[in-house]
Amino acid sequence: MTTTSRAAAAAATTPGPAITARGLRKAYGDHVVLDGIDLTVAEGTVFSLLGPNGAGKTTMVQILSTLVAADGGEVRVGGYDPVREPRDVRAQIGVTGQFAAVDGMLTGEENLLLMADLHHLGRKKGRRRTAELLERFDLTGAARKLPATYSGGMKRRLDLAMTLVGEPRIIFLDEPTTGLDPRSRHSMWQIVRDLVAGGVTVFLTTQYLEEADQLADRIAVLHGGGLVAEGTAEELKRLVPGGHVRLRFADPEAYERAGRALRDASRDDDALTLQIPSDGSTRELRALLDWLDAESVEADELSVHTPDLDDVFFALTEQTTGHTHTGTIKESVR
């Protein structure tokens, strides 16, 4: 095989991005919701979109899932254009909205069978798929009951099971755990992890920052019509000041020696602790440990503190944040 042939074969087997958007714009009258959004979502990953209420997260999902047309820009979902090729897009996607879209007049099993009929699975295959999903989502015991008897977590599991009847390769989860108790939320997180392990791509919008931290391979923050930051959770956390290493000493002499040498450290003389500004990186931590070892200074306790996504979210979505700030932040995490 020639070099050209091998390159062509490799390109054919290399998966492309599941979702891309370039210059995506959407406005309602004078209100600009999305103003030139660029993003890429890799196959088989969780991409989380964060933002305050009204930031445009649901509008983004509606555009990508063919429900609303963009005013400008280029979009591809599974390689297809949602406007020109909506049927091809819909054949690959599933959407679970903010509120469970189950039919209250049908049992859990009947809701799934209805979705199987809509996907033209046929009677035998539809019943088999329904039974699989009821078991997978721990709903077999409630299969013949009306959703009115379900807990909030059970309704959300049924809603997601209905989304999966057609075996989509790309799933949009728009605030899927809103209103759920912590146990149900953790159960839903495990379901998402299992889906991604099977190669499914998940586009997640959420206001639960812990949820994005737990699940997302990449996170983008939407504010003021643009993406003000994008990166992994750890990359985003390093954008916000406040990270530090805390050293606690039992020996006052060792504390004083360290305090004199580490001049940038904040001191707490009563607790014999030093707080040293740090981005939490392995490089900075190793340098500090090497210095302590070289000077024979022994700290009784060392802890690393980094900003969490709450800190990132509040810092990036302040009303003063503008597009001039956006470019700088995005470049810093790429």
Image (cartoon, rainbow, N blue to C red):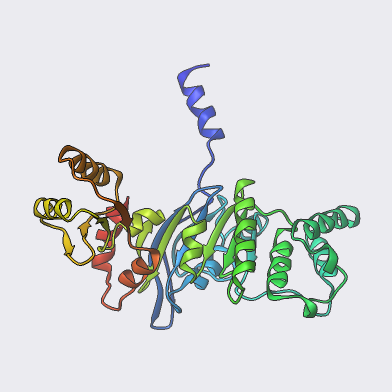
Q: Tell me residue 195's x, y (percent).
A: 64, 52
Residue 126 higher or lower than 148, as above or below: above
Q: Tell me residue 265's x, y (percent).
A: 16, 58
Q: Which of 22/199 is in front?
A: 199
Residue 272 higher or lower than 10, as above or below: below
> Left or right of 21: which side holds 173?
right
Q: Which of 194/61 is in front?
A: 194
> Left or right of 133: which side holds 84?
left
Tell me which corner region of the image, top left, top right, bottom left or bottom right, holds residue 266.
Answer: bottom left
Q: Which of 139/287 is in front?
A: 287
Q: Is residue 312 visible?
A: yes
Given the current orientation, which residue lies at the most extreme right position? 124
> Left or right of 210: which side holds 132?
right
Give the residue at x 55% y 50%.
79
Tell me which corner region of the image, top left, top right, bottom left or bottom right, holds residue 192.
Answer: bottom right
Give the residue at x 65% y 54%.
92
> Left or right of 195: which side holds 230?
left
